[in-house]
Amino acid sequence: MGTLKYLLANIIYPLAAFAVSLILTRVCITVLPHLGYMDMPKGRHIHKRPVPRAGGIGFIIAFWFSIMLFAGKLCDGDFTKLADQNVGKFLIALGGASVILFFTGLYDDRFDMPSVIKLLLQIVAGVTLYFLGGGIRTVFDCTLPPYLALIVTVCWTIGIVNAFNLIDGLDGLAAGLASISSICIAAWTMLTGGNLPMVILLFTFCGACLGFLVFNFSPARIFMGDTGSMFLGLFFAITSMDQCSRPAVTVAALLVPLVAIGVPIFDVILAIWRRSVRRFGVHMLKENLDDVEAVTELEHGIDSTGRIELKTVLKNENGVMDADQDHLHHRLLRESHNKTSRAVLLMYAISVVFSLGAIALTFIGQRMPALAFLLVIIGVFFTLRLANIELLASMSVVTQGVRFPRKSFILTAAHPLIDFLMVTVSFFLIYAFMSNKIQSFYNVYLFLIMVVPYFLVLILSGIYRTYWLRAGIERYYTLMKLLFLAACISFILLNICAMKGWILASNMKRTTLILFLLQTSFSFAAIIAERFLLHFFESFAIRSYYLKNSPEASKHNTVIYGGGLGCRMYINNLYSSRHLSCPFHILGIVDEDPSLQKLNVYGFQVLGTSDDLEKLYKKTPFDTIVLTTVNISNEFIDRIRAFAREHNVRLTMFLSQEYPADLEFFQLLQSKAINPIVEEKPDEQDDPGLGI
């Protein structure tokens, strides 16, 4: 009740911020064009007409005007007392740093300041913030050395400032996300009995953003520019640092502020990940210019996202800091068919879900850990869904390594380290789970007994002389036997040491057995799963992601004729690295065998027989039929050829038979082979007959 009364007594300040921001933003729309602050449509810009920018001036002035009135009330008009209060310290640090960024943004919005100079001024702002009493000085009650605290403060400031700068790509996006984030942090502060003046400050900030949002929402009449976006980033950088530096801070205290601004942070992480992987992939292709496949892909191909031409990337040498059009808001804009307001509302929804999820975790984590764990798992899968382009780009690099094995030796060489980390992580997870039973024993010896046998057995066996991206089932069987041997050695050592009382008491047989079984299960699962995931990403996953993101995939619908072993080999070939950039979308399989009808074969549905081709075509048009069997009568071939000729459908055959090594026959096959990267439709006058 006291909190509600306090909010009602001070609601005038958020309302004043909203009203003043509304008025000043309207003034900026009229005045700024006369001062040269206009954003002209060009390059990556989405808007089609000139729009005033640097509108952040309005809500920044509105915020400081309202908050100074509130600060005057807090200190009874004596501003010298303001520094003694938490809100006062916050405002002093924010004020000093924001002055630097305010004039930096004004100049940049008018004259386009070089990025290096802007970065240097952001560093100066971070240093100023630190010496005015802000910044991260303690973490979980541990005081950081001054030099380290300064570095962390500057890096965090630069990161959050640029996160909001990058997210400001759609009408109303940055201002709306800032409003949601400030409301979330304010609500969490109230729920946990935090500093009420800080709540008023957050609501005042929200009021100023909402006043600007009235004119900034799609279609925008004004943009905030770097002047506004850098101020938003600075405000949340200081807010999150203030939470971190509080005494007796908990993980929950850090979780909500960070997740509240999680959308901009997540977008920056994705951008760095995406651009780094793309650059690495392009360098890998450049190093293989003597390879025919690499040259062909550079000449004709597009990257794994289905949007960027490889030869353009290679020519321009795009770096990590270079702009692209794969930010979260760009993706949602494409999915919403370029409807800006819909894309922005989806971003709002994501931010709200993130914020509510963080608040929920802080309250149910202790009481219902299972439900909290479930929420985390859901969040991870949701996050991976948003990172589909980055996952695809990363898997594309792995695929390039498969195609050019001499460049992928790192994957093989890294496996001993990966396995050791897997077993080590498994041990510490089990140890944390059973710490109440084994915490009084010698952990180092226990670690050596439970982890080292796996590492030594696998190293000495020579199993690592395996290229796991092309490993056969025999190598997996050998790996299982070696893991079983290592588990036996670990079990024997564990029991011997327990009997001697060196690590576990002899009467703790049940604990010893549970410890061994859990460690063995986790280690086996981790080592096998890591290798399985390599195959999964290298083949099926990367092509599936490509087809989902490729705008051309829906234009190349394909039907497979024959559900036998030839079909299996064709699908394996299609999901190999050679065909990953080929936008064939398999609709299903056609087969004459009545026992296969309506069943799923090799991951695809059997849609019917050759008699059903006409019906299938009317339901979903396709442009290719691939014959994967040679056990087909002339009657069926003539029927399929007639259908293909009538509907101008290309008819090809995938050969999976063994033939004599006849040079002329081989050259004939090579001359008629289908290029998997650039498929050319046959001319209408050509007979769409067999491709051989």
Image (spheres, grey):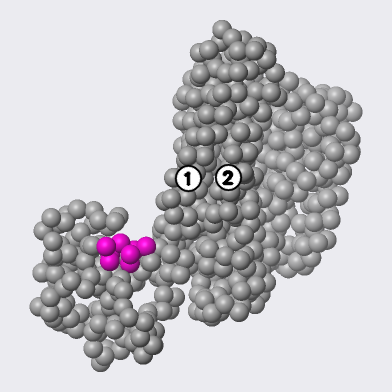
Numbered badge on residue 478: 1
The stretch drawn in magenta includes residue 571: yes
| Span colored in magenta | 565-572
Is 204 positioned to the left or the right of 136 in the image?
A: left
Residue 292, horizontal then vertical, whole percent: 54, 79
Q: What residue is rendered at 80% in x and 56% in y?
A: 119
**First in sequence: mark 1 vs mark 2:** 2
Is 586 positioned to the left or the right of 247 in the image?
A: left
The quadrant where residue 257 appears: top right
Numbered badge on residue 461: 2
Disc 1: CA contacts within 10 A as few (<14), some (14-19) or many (>=20):
few
Secondary structure of residue under mark 2: helix
Distance between the alpha carbons at the discs numbered 1 and 2: 10 Å
Is 113 positioned to the left or the right of 209 in the image?
A: right
Which is nearer the eye, 354 or 584?
Answer: 584
Secondary structure of residue under mark 1: helix
Residue 583, horizontal then vertical, whole percent: 40, 69
Q: Main secondary structure of the magenta part?
A: helix
Q: What residue is rendered at 59% in x and 39% in y?
A: 457
Relative to 134, say whether 441 is above or below: above
Residue type beneath disc 1: Thr
Which residue is most to the bottom?
Answer: 685
- Quarter that holds the C terminus: bottom left
